[in-house]
Amino acid sequence: MSSFMTVDHPGLLSLVVDKERLGFQNIGISAGGPADHYSCHWANKLVGNDDILPCIEVVGDGAQFTFSDDCTIAITGGTSEIRLNHAIHPSWQNFQIKSGDRLQIQNSALGIRHYIAVCGGLTVEPIFGSATAVTRDGLGGQRGDGSAVSVSEKLAYKCKQFPWALHAPKQAIIQAHKSLCIDLVMGYQFDKFKPSGRQQFFSNNYTLTPNSSRMAARFAGSPILSPSDPILSEGIAKGALQIPPDGLPIVMLADRQTVGGYPKLGSVTSHASDLLAQACAGSEVQFNPIDFQLAHNKLNLKHVATQRLYSECEANRRKAEYLS
């Protein structure tokens, strides 16, 4: 008999996500994957999963789940109040679930997305190599059609327990802010914009709008002049910053379309994409121009720092194992 978590309430939006659906953009299939890759990876790490296995991405608060059997879970992402049978538990660490336990996510403060990972992952059939739900493609998720999880739905999981208590080091926890400075790597279409438009763009403060989504972060503010020369549609990378005819920037995120024809100033970094995925509507954003080499160096330093934090977390596990 399968173990399962019952969706008592999905909150604003709950989706099944795992690693990206890579290698199919040439046939019009979006990559998808977790909107905040960093937090999702940590959730899996804290329950002993070596990779990003199928888990739940929850937007906002109000989500409630009941578990049929014992397992180990971890919740990462935005700052929120985690309740297990009415007792408050901290996020960014794992904890043991018993049969009949009820989990609630509420009172989100900073950061709008949360990741619930289960030891061994959810049992969801992959499509094109991934279980990630991409609604606009109609692919992935619990029912295979890209839909979000719904009330009373049962999400099967492997009845496994990770025996060691783990918590992410304080430095690992993502810090969501209402004011962000986002690095932008300037691209090959950068020179198509007039110098005055480029200067105005980097001087502006933009506001994240409520119609942002997993597909793209959209901004309000002072528009800049978009190049009038026609541009052929081309493949779209995660983080690409487009300037449509209205002059207001759009940053493409996990569920982006596969091709687009708007001119691009460049691309935000992977770390910046995670921060934008956690930002709430009304957040103020300013863009900072950096070149490719500096972006590459920052990425390497971030990778080294994260690996060091993983090692610290693993050392704590080994210490707990030895003392037991």
Image (cartoon, grey):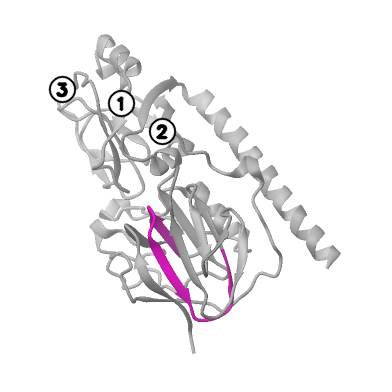
Residue 55 place in picture, x, y as percent: 46, 64
**Mark positioned earlier in the residue sequence (2 or 1):** 2
What kind of residue is marked 1?
Tyr
**What's the magenta region?**
55-73
Foreground tag (3 vs 1): 1
Residue tagged by mark 2? 178
Residue tagged by mark 3? 229
Residue 264 place in picture, x, y as percent: 28, 28
Residue 50, above or below 170: below
Cα–Cα gap, marks 2 and 1: 12 Å
Q: Is residue 288 magenta?
A: no
Please give left or right for residue 137 compared with residue 245 in the image.
right
Labels 2 and 1 touching (C-beta < 8 A): no
Residue tagged by mark 1? 206
Q: Badge 2, how many Cα within 10 Å: few under 14, some, many 20+?
A: some
Q: Which mark is residue 4?
A: none
Kind of element beneath mark 3: loop
Farthest-out residue, bottom: 1
What kind of residue is marked 3?
Asp
Q: Quadrant of residue 316?
A: bottom right
Q: Is residue 65 magenta?
A: yes
**Which sits in the foreground, 187 or 280?**
280
Please give left or right for residue 91 compared with residue 249 in the image.
right
Cα–Cα gap, marks 3 and 1: 25 Å
- Dominant SS in magenta: strand
Q: Residue at horizontal 41%, vertical 29%?
A: 179
Q: Badge 3, how many Cα within 10 Å: few under 14, some, many 20+?
A: few
Q: Quadrant of the C terminus?
A: bottom right
Residue 23 place in picture, x, y as percent: 38, 54
Q: Residue at horizontal 40%, vertical 47%?
A: 112
